[in-house]
Image (cartoon, rainbow, N blue to C red):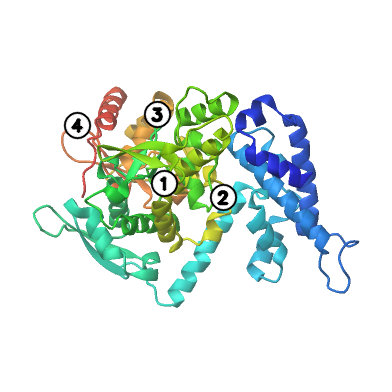
Amino acid sequence: FCICYNHLLVIQDDAEFFEQQKPCTLKQITTIVEVLRRLLQTLYWEGIPKVIDPRTLSIPRQWLQVRTAATELFRQLRVRQSRRQFCDPDIWMMSHISFPLFKGELESKNSRRASMILQKIPFVLTFQQRVELFYSFIRNDRKNMEASGVNFGHGAGVGIRIRRNRVLTDGFESLTKIGPSIKGRIQVQFINEHGIQETGIDGGGLFKEFVTELLRDAFDPQLGLFKQTSHEFTYPNPTSHANPNFSNHSAYFQFVGMIVGKCLYDGIIIEPQFANFFLRKLLGYRNYVDDLTSLDPEIYKNLIYLKKNSAAGLELTFSVQRDVFGDSKAVDLIPNGSNIAVTDHNRMKFIYEMADFTLNREIAVQSRAFVHGLNSVIKPDWLRMFEAEELDRLISGTPVIDVADLKANTAYAGGYDEKHELIRWFWSIIDTDLDEKERRSFLKFATSVSRSPLLGFQHLYPKFCIQRSSGDSENLPTSSTCMNLLKIPRYRSRAKLKEKLLYAIKASSGFYLT
């Protein structure tokens, strides 16, 4: 059954799975998930005394085959769940496994069962548990790096000089060859547009500012390395190889991947969000037709239409038109594809080739380079504990802003404290007057990122701080995003504070480096 259903799921699109519910209803599939979870918990964790060979203390071959087939089906159904939830998330959890015991076995390395579950079906642990494991792996790796001579302390590490008008290229030239030291402390010294060294010692804030500006530049679609979907999710530009400004474009993709890995390693969330299909590439997965929805829903809709209708009259060939920096070019999906018509007999092959080209082959060089850079900092096994949507939260934070959590993890300076009248007005405005979109704009104004840290604001570094600024009370609030510092003049009324704060947020005029 598992093998047959596996083959069916490969060719079944989401409409057939979720809407038509053939050959199984979603209720029946939920039952299948429950049965598979119990079976796999036995085969991976508890063991079956009656089937274990007493001579070798191992599971016989036929049971290993059962486990392999059940695992593959369990994983494929989980992919559907990750795209569109069809059953209670708790159904996937092996809640009877003690997490302290599981974690202890991983650390002791005396048992393979915990590592096998983490490798094959990690989603049977809660997301929170896997995040805890992820950061524990980083802590252990940091200790090993320190023992090997990589510096993590203040005032130590690799020093780099970055010109304000060349952040990406200077960063590339300074960091591409430092090897494992990328995991350690990077001391940034900025040079202004006049060639003068800016004052200030990097205690972590300048490095955050550096990577924020670097990634903003790198992911800017105008640069030509990356593009954005219609929903503003980022993915590699398929024609980056033709960009005259980046003859070594793959080296830049590797570099940017390394910087994203460094942000993950240091717990720095970044503003850009990656398209789901590209996140799957970072996890080592191949994309299929249904993954097109995260790149181009219109292409997906057209391919599904072709799957269910005749190709007659469409005048399609096994080729696709691509715009390469202003020039339209026909690209064959298969050898001599522009001379092979799509018919009712070969339309399924066309659908597969079109999706495979668009999602995999067209960005293969860029994705491979990016992943190589990412994996130079973050081990692939650490990433594969997560699904694409979860990796997005790990890299770019969570969209929900918990105002109470932010308030509980805020410091004050310059004469302000939590009991100050203006501070009470401030939190009242943030909590009750601003909608969710305005809160995200405020957070980006103050910290450079519009999403919350994955594990809460206690993990925001440097800690968020509100400081009283000097000068005229008619001045706008300002922010030093490198230090997560918000500076607010002493306004005399709540209404004035709200007016000035909203104006500053919407005008994005708050950045002021000190």
Residue topped by disc 3: 437
Q: Nearer the viewer, mark 2 or mark 1?
A: 1
| SS assignment at label 3 | helix
Ranked by sequence position, the earlier of labels 4 and 1 is: 1
Separation (CA) of disc 4 from disc 1: 55 Å
Residue 43, quarter of the rendered image: bottom right
Mark 4 and mark 2: span between their CA atoms?
48 Å
Between tags 4 and 2, which lies in front?
A: 2
Q: Earlier in the sequence, mark 2 or mark 1?
A: 1
Amino acid type, residue under disc 3 in the picture = Lys
Q: Which residue is mark 4?
A: 473
Residue 58: percent from left, percent from top: 81, 68
Q: Which residue is mark 1?
A: 362
Mark earlier in primary sequence (3, 4): 3
Mark 3 or 4: in front is 3
Residue 386 image label: 2
> Toward which corner of the image does residue 220 lie, by quadrant?
top left
